[in-house]
């Protein structure tokens, strides 16, 4: 691969993918950016990315319309910690509940509203 990178300096990190496309004037608006990302026209770190609000950090590579952009942090900016990558399969699965435990019962209302003796109506509570 013989790609030349266009270097982009970030003032702060992370930046969301759809916002970066807007800032770089690669798209006309946020809606167009989100549609292009969802349809798979944008790549991040040499992989197609369909996550609209993916957080990008310095060192990441953005690919759009045959051009490659290398993200770098400006000298006066403070770098943010990049979160550890988690496998997609593990994050979507919920922890299984033990079979022996009964389901939580709904809490029953113990207080009954007071009824006015003269009118027979209950008071209205705003709050």
Image (cartoon, rainbow, N blue to C red):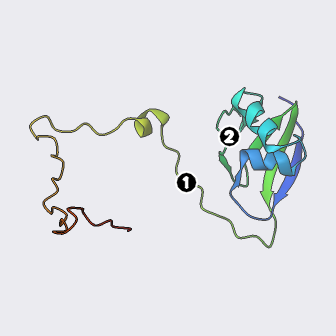
| Displayed quadrant of residue 98 | top left
> Considering the image in quadrants, where does the N terminus appear?
top right
Identify which residue, 11 or 103, lies in the foreground: 103
Q: Residue 121: x and y, percent?
A: 24, 62
In front of the other: 42 or 19: 19
x, y percent for residue 92: 43, 36
Q: Which residue is mark 1?
A: 83
- Measuring 85% from the left and 38% from the top, which residue is drawn there? 68
- The answer to which quarter of the image holds residue 29 is top right
Mark 1 to mark 2: distance in Å? 17 Å
Residue 123, above or below 82: below
* Marks 1 and 2, the one that precedes in the sequence: 2
**Total numbered circles:** 2
The vertical placement of 39 against 85, above or below, is: above
- Looking at the image, residue 54 sits to the left or right of residue 83; the answer is right
Q: Residue at x 79, y 65 (%)?
A: 11
> Residue 46 at what x, y percent from top left?
72, 33
**Left or right, 13 with reference to 121:** right
Answer left or right for 76 relative to 104.
Answer: right
**Residue visible at 79% across and 49% down?**
20
Q: Residues within 10 Å of mark 1 (few under 14, many from 20)?
A: few
Q: Residue furthest front?
A: 118
Callout in the foreground (1, 2): 2
Q: Secondary structure at mark 1?
A: loop
Which quadrant is home to the C terminus? bottom left
Name the residue at 88% across, 30% down.
Answer: 66
Element type at mark 2:
loop
Mark 2 lies on residue: 52
Residue 84 vertical position relative to residue 36 in the rendered view, above or below: below
Question: Where is residue 103 drawn, in percent x and y?
Answer: 16, 41
């Amino acid at each position: 691969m013989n790609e030349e990178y266009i270097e982009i300096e970030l003032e702060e990190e992370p930046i969301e993918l759809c916002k970066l496309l807007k800032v770089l004037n690669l798209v006309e608006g946020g809606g167009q950016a989100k549609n292009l990302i969802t349809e798979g026209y944008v790549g991040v770190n040499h992989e197609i990315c369909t996550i609209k609000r993916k957080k990008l950090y310095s060192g990441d590579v953005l690919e759009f319309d045959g051009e490659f952009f290398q993200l770098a942090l400006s000298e006066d900016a403070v770098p943010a910690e990049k979160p550890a990558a988690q496998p997609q399969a593990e994050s979507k699965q919920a922890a299984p509940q033990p079979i022996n435990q009964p389901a939580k019962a709904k809490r029953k209302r113990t207080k009954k509203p007071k009824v006015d003796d003269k009118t027979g109506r209950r008071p209205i509570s705003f709050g």
